[in-house]
Image (tube, grey):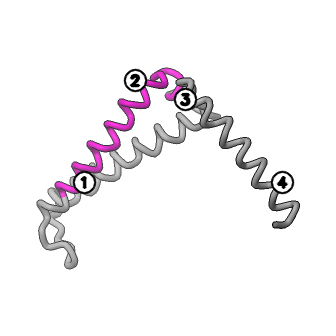
Amino acid sequence: MDITLMARSRTSYTKMSMVMKQWRNGKMNNYIKTVLNKRYEADIADAKYKIKCFSEHELVIPEHPDITLEVDKLLQKIAEAEDKLAVMRQHYGKNEAEKTVL
């Protein structure tokens, strides 16, 4: 194994190890919280928009003729994202995750 590759992997391992220790201790990097929070909110907004398009425009996708199944999948996506947001807020604090990053 190349020396530089070994050094890089050791540095990556050390950084990952520090992050994992923070997670185990109930702490999370504020930036990670913000990114995850926005990801889950974007997933929710995307699914709601698609459901709105299905209902308002009565769109039929040739590959997916069963609209109710597609809406069910989108509702599942919303439920999963909301669950993840709730868990993150419960275990890692709501206020810290909602700070905006400039």
Residue for badge 3: 24
Residue for badge 4: 7
Seen in the picture, residue 56 relative to 94 is either above or below; the reply is: below
The amino acid type of the residue labelled 1 equals Leu
Q: Secondary structure at mark 2?
A: helix
The amino acid type of the residue labelled 4 equals Ala
Q: Secondary structure at mark 4?
A: helix
Residue at 39 percent across and 34 percent down: it is 85
- Check the picture and name the quadrant holding the C terminus: top right
Residue at 48 percent across and 25 percent down: it is 92
| Residue 94, magenta (yes or no) | yes
Which label lies toward us, 3 or 1?
Answer: 3
Which label lies toward us, 2 or 4?
Answer: 4
> Is there CB contact under 8 Å for labels 3 and 1?
no
Residue range (magenta): 71-97
Q: Position of residue 41 (x, y in %)?
A: 40, 41
Residue for badge 2: 90
Which of marks 4 and 2 precedes in the sequence? 4
Which of marks 1 and 4 precedes in the sequence? 4
Which of marks 1 and 2 precedes in the sequence? 1
Q: How many angstroms separate mark 4 from mark 1 (CA)?
A: 44 Å
Q: How many angstroms separate mark 3 from mark 1 (CA)?
A: 32 Å
Q: How many angstroms separate mark 4 from mark 3 (CA)?
A: 26 Å
Q: Quadrant of residue 59?
A: bottom left
Q: Position of residue 29 (x, y in %)?
A: 61, 31
Which label lies toward us, 2 or 3?
Answer: 3
> Is there CB contact under 8 Å for labels 2 and 3?
no
Q: Position of residue 33 (x, y in %)?
A: 53, 34
Which label lies toward us, 4 or 1?
Answer: 4
Residue for badge 1: 74
Seen in the picture, residue 61 relative to 101 is either above or below; the reply is: below
